[in-house]
Image (spheres, grey):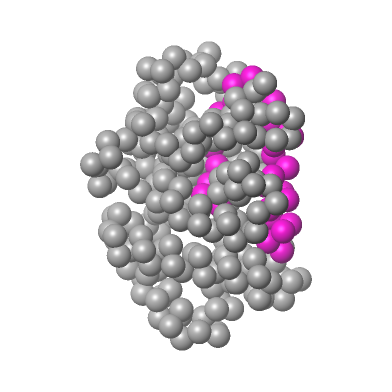
Amino acid sequence: MATIYLVRHGQAGGQDYNKLTAAGEEQARLLGRYLKRAGIHFDSTATGSLGRQQETLQLIRSEMSAEACPEPDTHNELNEIEPRVFAALAADLRGQDDHFRREFERWTDSLYKDSQRATDPDAVQNYRSLLTRMLRHWILERGPDRGRIPSFEQFRATVLSVRTKVKGKRILLISSGTPIALLIAAAFAPLQKPTTALRILQYIQNTSLSVFHQHGSRWEPVRINCTPHIDPADSILNTVI
């Protein structure tokens, strides 16, 4: 039986969402120190191909020995939804819904001007609302021409296929919010409605740790969305954006 440690990347933001913020860097280092103190040794690690995922793992590894946290493999199945998909969904909704357009533009403009707004409660709520609206639009197949972007079910199937591709007895995977939410939802209820993952996604914290026992292609949840390395009272490091 293998044990899977599934981690969301550290906070990224500002004008380059593929680069960690200072808070995101600290989140990753703290997780590396926690794993070292806990005496956890991985025999394999992997990320997707995204810079924020790879940077997170590099910083975790910088706090651990090479033997405890070896060089990673790359599994594109761990990648977040492509930016072109988000862009197409947002454009489609902006053309249909004036309220969505105003809220989307207000949120993106303010975030690009000040990446620290990612920890502001109003910004977090706006993010959750906009993201849920876009993904629901995609899941319910009300989005752009299906030829322009993959379907939600295609994306979901790609993500879940990683369960049969990772190898080892104790495995560290660095991924992103949507893939993690889909993997958690599938572990709890394989036949659940696709929208179940949306409720989970809203609460996946940066560098949160979810642990599973692997039985073939099935993952059994042990711990979900845990941040033992972050002080619960720290408003800077407890982030979901």
Place of residue 182 in the rendered image (x, y in percent of width and height, measured from the top left): 61, 49
Quadrant assignment, res 64: top left
Query: Residue 131 magenta-drawn?
Result: no
Residue 232 falls in which quadrant of the image?
top left
Name the image quarter holding residue 114: bottom left
At horizontal 43% and vertical 62% (from top left) the residue drawn is 128
Question: Can the viewer see residue 110?
Answer: yes
> Relative to the observer, which residue lies in front, 110 or 162?
162
Q: Position of residue 168 (x, y in %)?
A: 66, 21
Does residue 231 appear left or right of residue 174 in this picture?
A: left
Q: Quadrant of the N terminus?
A: top right
Give x and y (percent) for residue 46.
60, 32
Q: Residue at x 55, y 78 (%)?
A: 93
Q: Horizontally, is 200 left or right of 62 in the view? A: right
Question: Which range is magenta?
Answer: 151-178
Q: Residue at 55% of width from left, 69% of height from top?
A: 134
Q: Is residue 66 visible?
A: no
Residue 219 vertical position relative to residue 147 in the rendered view, above or below: above
* Depth check, front residue: 46 or 37: 37
Residue plotted at (28% across, 59% down): 120
Q: Position of residue 160 (x, y in %)?
A: 69, 45
Between 191 and 72, the one nearer to me in the picture: 191
